[in-house]
Image (cartoon, grey):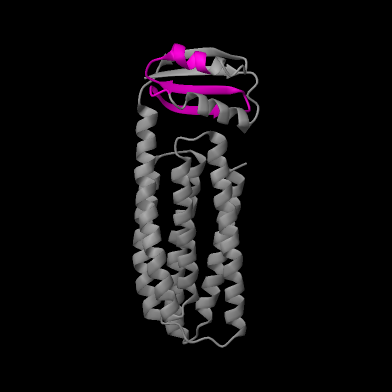
Amino acid sequence: MYKTVFHISKMDCPSEENLIRLKLNGIKDISRLDFDIENRKLTVYHKNNLELIDKSIAELNLDSKIISTEVFSDEIHSEESNQRKVLWSVLIINFAFFLIEIISGLISNSMGLVADSLDMLADAFVYGISLYAVGGTMSRKKSIARLAGYFQLTLAAIGFIEVLRRFIGAEAFPDFKTMIIVSFFALIANSICLYLLQKSKSQEAHMRASMIFTSNDVIINLGVIIAGILVLLLNSGIPDLIVGSVVFVIVINGAIRILKLSN
């Protein structure tokens, strides 16, 4: 495997990137393209056929030249494969617990569980778009993190509206047993997800965003368990609504951290 870096003077926007991708699409020896539009550089990971690659890019008349070429190991590709495996694992876990918590929350009338289920759904969404970011350019990875942040903010706003509605209206008493049991298993699931993400040791924006979300989930699960205990001790549904509100504050804080990370 070889790594060849091109400087392309006239590559200053995504349209040139698309032209190059289309031009090189038929060359089977190319395994990956990394575009750095800001610095007008293209890194090509390939097996052979450097002359064909150089000729194909030159035919686009974008003033291209080879800066360097070197033998390249498969370490990055192994890392990307590991990232995909980890993200698929945590995506499946989070989406499964979204279904479990949303159903349990609605049946038990627990705002804490409903809030946590929406956070699980947001996480599943983050992991899904993070899978799309693996192997992509740095700008795309930051865009993915930014999209995840805005998605979290939207869910938090919806959640706060529901909490307010429940504070004002007369809602049925939440089932504290369901709250505690479901949240306990969700805590175990999120702890496993966090372990898998930290084990990957990736510092890329989309993976760091995933770790931030999962860290929030562990805190949230503990909060819902405490709320269930308080509902039992105080014989009141207010702790459930308070924890629901706190959950959405945590979600907003996580979203802001993600947005800062994507800048």
Q: Quadrant of residue 263?
A: top right
Percent coordinates x, y for residue 171 in the rendering: 53, 86
Look at the picture and state if 74 lies above or below 194. Answer: above
Question: Left of 73 or right of it: where is 136?
Answer: right
Q: Position of residue 66 (x, y in %)?
A: 53, 13
Residue nearest the observer in this picture, 101 or 216? 101
Image vertical order of residue 29 relative to residue 134, above or below:
above
Q: For this rendering, which residue is in front, 97 or 167?
A: 97
| Near-viewer residue (22 or 88) | 22
- Image point 38% across, 64% down: which residue? 97
Residue range (magenta): 27-56
* Magenta residue check for 15: no
Residue displayed at 39% across by 52% down: 194
Decide which of 219, 154 is in the foreground and name it: 154
Q: Position of residue 148 (x, y in %)?
A: 54, 51
* Residue occupying the point 51% across, 28% down: 22
Asked whether residue 225 appears in the rendered view, the answer is no
Q: In the image, what residue occupies the spot 41% across and 82% down?
A: 175
Residue 204 at x, y percent in the picture: 49, 38
- Quarter of the figure that contains the N terminus: top left
Residue 8: name its quadrant.
top right
Asked whether the viewer can see residue 251, the reply is yes
